[in-house]
Image (tube, rainbow, N blue to C red):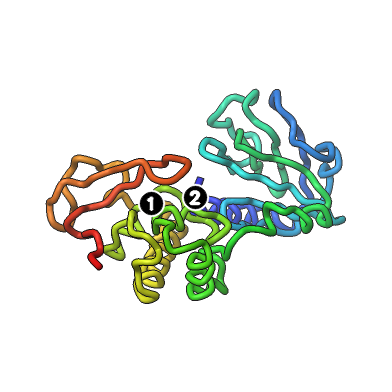
Amino acid sequence: MEGDSVLRIARRLDERLAGHEVSARTPGQRRPDGLPVSELDGRTLARAESRGKHLILHFEGGLALHCHMGMRGSWQLCEQGERWRRPAREAWIALAGNGAEAVNFGGSKLRIVREAQLNRDPRLARLGPDILAGDFDPAVAAARIRSAGPDLKVGDALLGQRLVAGIGNIFRSEGCFEARLDPRTPVGSVSDEQLLEVLDATRSLMLEAVETGRQPKQVYRRAGMPCPRCGTKILSQAQGESARTTYWCPSCQPPLRD
């Protein structure tokens, strides 16, 4: 799940549950790590926030629910008593209050911890600037990307959560397409202006997706299909250590020449 989806979930949870006492239960076969769910039951949700691809729910009394949904996790927000879209056995936790119910299904991480422990979490501490944060500074993110070395490919840099947090495979492809930059280009071969442009383009696309709920599909998963700009066949290639597939138009995003 990419940062736009996490931010949208955080906003919805904040609107419906923040400031209200919630009941907490574990209806499924799995349990959150850390403290027992009973520690959250009856507490007031103070606020929900996103940090890159991480969702954090802050409760009164210094407790937090930390969630990373990975590729297949999700949250469903519904009215209390409404039927869930997935089986109850797949639910990790259900939070109910103010006439609403928020249910988490799966993901790569779900834990209940004290705020002090959360603040010491090295994985969160190592996150780069959140591309969707209100105070996001593309120059700071660009400098962090540069610090990773000139041979790092732009597409890999955009996925590096320690460099800039929140971007996933969809928006690394779509951001590079919007900026007309080949994602296979080494960082050392692009100008500061080009690097800032791809960060700005990616952020703009993601902010639009937060508001509309629709992610762009100009090139993503369109390999072999005509480019919506020029009609050239879109290409794809596994990129980086994780071998995630990136997509680009060879005409609109030509390789840079020295």
The residue sitting at 56% across, 63% down in the picture is 130
Q: Is label 2 in contact with label 1 (beta carbons under 8 Å)?
A: yes
Say which of 138 and 206 sits in front.
Answer: 138
Tell me the amino acid under the disc marked 2. Answer: Glu
As helix, strand or loop, the secondary structure at mark 2 comes to: loop
As helix, strand or loop, the secondary structure at mark 1 comes to: loop
The picture places residue 146, in percent across and down from the top left corner, at 48, 67
Say which of 164 and 109 sits in front.
Answer: 164
The residue sitting at 70% across, 47% down in the picture is 66
Tell me the amino acid under the disc marked 1. Answer: Gln
The picture places residue 228, in percent across and down from the top left corner, at 18, 53
Q: Please identify the quarter of the rendering in which residue 104 is found.
A: top right
The residue sitting at 53% across, 31% down in the picture is 85
The residue sitting at 61% across, 41% down in the picture is 79
Question: Which residue was labeled with disc 1?
Answer: 215
The picture places residue 110, in percent across and down from the top left corner, at 69, 40
